[in-house]
Image: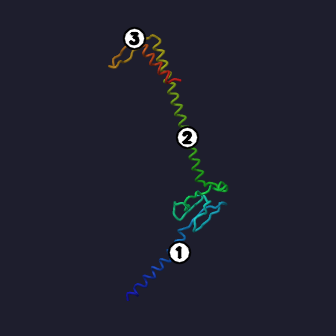
């Protein structure tokens, strides 16, 4: 009686094994573009002269075809250049180029702002030097925050400081 109950179970197991064994070749399919640009389907990996960029699908998603130890794949054949990139690649390249151009324009604008600021600072330094040379009383705050009028020694020291800044920053 037990054997009679196990028979349907055995049939079910055998049927499942047949179904799944039929699916395994479908899961192990390779797809690549040959030298003429035609799609090739196979249960074995592509030849070694097919570059990795032309392999569209492998059984191990994301894995590259097996490589024999100590060998490197040869360079892509000349006919590989005849294969046109997909629209997505062209759009990506166009976006990259546009982003690079925008970054270059931004760097250029920033450099212009820095040059303008440097020129403005140099003009202020020269104007301050002119004020010191004019002989007009110059008042500044000392270390205690109290106003002081520069004497001749203070004027000479301030003129020397301003000239040093002009020499180092204004070209």
Q: Residue furthest left?
A: 144
Q: Which dot, 1 or 2, sits closer to the camera?
A: 1
Residue for point 60% across, 58% down: 54
Give the quarter of the figure containing the N terminus: bottom left
Q: Mark 1 to mark 3: distance in Å?
A: 103 Å
Image height of 98 relative to 54, above or below: above
- Which residue is at a point 59% across and 57% down the rendered structure image? 73
Q: Position of residue 128 (x, y in %)?
A: 46, 17
Which residue has dot 1 on it? 22
Q: Earlier in the sequence, mark 1 or mark 3?
A: 1
Q: CA distance from mark 2 to mark 3?
A: 54 Å
User: Can you identify the residue that label 3 sits on?
Assistant: 151
Neighbourhood count class around disc 1 (C-alpha, 10 Å): few under 14, some 14–19, many 20 upward: few
Rate crowding at label 3 as few (under 14), some (14 to 19) or many (20 or more) other CA atoms within 10 Å: few
Q: Secondary structure at mark 3?
A: loop
Q: Earlier in the sequence, mark 2 or mark 3?
A: 2
Earlier in the chain: of badge 1 and badge 2, it is: 1
Which type of secondary structure does the marked residue at label 1 adopt?
helix
- Disc 1/disc 2 C-alpha distance (Å): 55 Å
Residue 90 placed where, x, y %? 60, 51
Identity of the residue furthest to the front in this view: 70
Q: Quadrant of residue 108?
A: top right
Give percent across and percent down for residue 62: 52, 60
Q: Which residue is mark 2?
A: 102
Residue at 33% over, 17% down: 146
Label 2 crowd (10 A; few <14 / some 14-19 / many >=20): few
């Amino acid at each position: 009686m037990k054997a009679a109950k196990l028979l349907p179970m055995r049939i079910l197991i055998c049927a499942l094994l047949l179904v799944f064994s039929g699916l395994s070749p479908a899961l192990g399919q390779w797809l690549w573009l040959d030298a003429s640009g035609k799609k090739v389907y196979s249960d074995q990996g592509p030849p070694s002269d097919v570059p990795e960029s032309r392999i569209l699908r492998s059984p191990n998603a994301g894995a590259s075809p097996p490589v024999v130890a100590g060998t490197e794949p040869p360079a892509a054949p000349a006919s590989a250049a005849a294969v046109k990139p997909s629209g997505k690649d062209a759009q990506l390249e166009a976006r990259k180029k546009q982003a690079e151009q925008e970054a270059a324009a931004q760097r250029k604008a920033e450099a212009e702002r820095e040059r303008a600021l440097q020129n403005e600072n140099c003009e202020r330094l020269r104007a301050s030097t002119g004020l010191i040379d004019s002989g007009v009383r110059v008042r500044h705050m000392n270390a205690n925050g109290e106003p002081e009028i520069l004497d001749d020694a203070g004027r000479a020291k301030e003129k020397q400081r301003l000239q040093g800044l002009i020499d180092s920053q204004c070209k």
